Amino acid sequence: MQLIVNITVLAAIYALLACGYVLIYRVSRVMNMAHGELAMLGAYLLYSTASLFVGHPFGAIAAAVVLSLASGVLVYLLLMRKMTGEMVLAAILTTVAIGILLRGTIVLVWSATQQHPLQALGFVNRSIELAGGARISACAALIVVMTVLVYGGLFVFLRFGRWGVRMRAAGQNALLAAQRGVNLNAIYALAWGLSTLTGSIAGMLIALDSGLDQSMVVIGLKAFAPALVGGLDSLVGALIGSVIVAGAEVLAIQYIDPLLSEVVPFLVLIAALIVRPWGLFGTREELDRV
Amino acid sequence: MSRQPRASGYLRTRYEDDLTLVRTRLERRSLVLFVLALLAFPLVASPFLLDLACQVFLACVGALSLMLLTGYAGQISLGHAGLIAAGAFTVGILFRETHAPFWITLPAAAAVGALLGVIFGLPSLRLRGLYLAVSTLALHFVVIYLGGEYEARRGFSTGILIDPPEIGGISISDGRAWYFILLAAAAATLLLCLNLLRARTGRAWRAIRAHETVAEALGIGIAGYKVLAFVISSAITAVAGALFAYYRGFVSVEAFSLFLTIQYLAMVIVGGMGSLLGALLGAGFVTLFPYLIEAGLLALPGAQRYADLLFAMNYAAFGLVMIGFLIFEPLGLVGIWHRIQSYFLLWPFRHRSASGSRR
């Protein structure tokens, strides 16, 4: 029972992070290798606002959410906009460079020691007993709930929202979309903003649950595996990929070797790439986009 | 190989002229001067400078091999640190388990590298671009995991110590000896790359990079040459890792993080894609960059306060430089170098005449 809870929580974390990869890739065919760092930035922003708005935890959370959305848009406007139309490899490497820059800056600003935003917000992370004797921390439960909400929101937004439809159009054929009057720059900026927002929500929740330090980057990188296993341009795929990868990882930790947790996502990834390179739910066309 | 005449009055009239490496008198003279300077350097340099030079030479070997793969054959690899780790660990394990001398461990490292090259290269037959990059990234984590597992199982949790190699009963631990060994290694790698690139193999790789379908239509065996690119590049990289292990006398998984891969990619990009000179310049730049930052920082007033921030500062500055090159100078240092060169070649004119081909 505890195993199932663990898998669910890990899958939720992966899914929340993976949808950021999917959003950007689907719209602009760029793989955002700085996603983990952006998630970490969001978490650190929450830590800062928490110490800024003492006594108003919800105000702090709202401010952090707005700031992280803005930082995603800023990354696009300042840096990635220059890379549109360049070789995709160059764009990917730019995101790698952005990641390194962010990592350095975060240590410079917030130092490398572990922080605990939960205490700064004045919350307590209670442990909840579930049926069957399993336990889950309140924050972990919140992660699962948030994942459901975010995915629900994204589905509705992409299917029915005016901007959501535009985003899908830009992803399918940027040129045609632009000729139909879709403002591509705005769309790309929105995609970066949304992706950073969802990533930051994941980062904040992980930080609330288990403290905040540089290791979050690794989680961000591991979340890359589910996104690819599921297919880089499919949200459903990201969700199912997360369940597969999280299941494999938790089972491997439980029954084989705890050290394996670092590699299992990538082993699953290799297997998936050999069998179905475009992912479970991805479209097949863009195998040689780069 | 080269696109433009280098000096007035120098015209290539035979096919062999296209293959010669050193063409004009100026080139020959400057090459001789450069080699003499390299040979004289250890006589005047301090141990610290010698260490820096050795690091640059090591980086050159790794960067050249990555340049072969990415810059010429067009196959993106994010597993470079994994391959370096594989070479280093081959030396470490062989030394610890069997006390093998270096003339066994170095070829063994190359063999392991070549084998890994086949494994890293096989996905390239099916995958391209982004997906290939990701699969090599995944393999990187697998190699690192295996290395860490060995360390943990055999009780070398902090790392494997390696004695300096011995030649004729004399162990090499002197900085100067290492300088010449690594210089020779870098020079040998450079020559190997140059020769590969002006032969059939290099032409095939460039054709594959330019357009796979066309290359295939020209009768180039895509699969073979792709795997060959991975095998050769990986073997050289593993040897670089082995030399690294001997030079440091110490192997530990922590040294081979993803950041190392990014550094090597940065060398290739900062130097300039598709140019061996670029790989050398990039290797020098990226290796020396942290020391430049450190020196610059220590020159500022109140330097002690920044000392613990140095690492983070390096990271941030490194990211900034990489972004800068990607956005503002995609041709890299080699692009700048060529611009300077043609400025002097054309002086007093600013531009090549309209009839002549530009670049």
Image (spheres, helix red, strand yellow):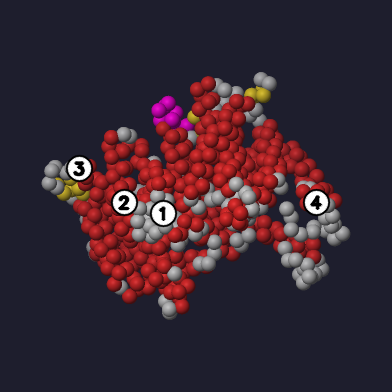
Residue type of the residue flagged with mark 1: Trp
Query: Type of residue at label 4?
Result: Tyr
Magenta span contains residue B153? yes
Q: Residues within 10 Å of mark 4 (few under 14, many from 20)?
A: few
In the rendered image of this protein, does residue B186 appear above or below residue A38? above
Which is nearer the N-term, disc 2 or disc 3? 3
Q: Establish if B263 lies above or below B342.
A: above
Q: Secondary structure at mark 1?
A: loop
Q: Nearer the viewer, residue B48 or B335?
A: B335
- CA–CA distance in space, label 1 to label 4: 46 Å
Magenta stretch: dominant SS? loop
Q: Which chain does the numbered disc 4 sit on?
A: B
Mark number, residue A242: 2
Quick check: do tags 2 and 1 share a chain? yes
Residue, x 51% and y 24% (percent of image)?
B96
Q: CA distance from mark 2 to mark 4?
A: 58 Å
The residue indicated by pointer 1 is A278
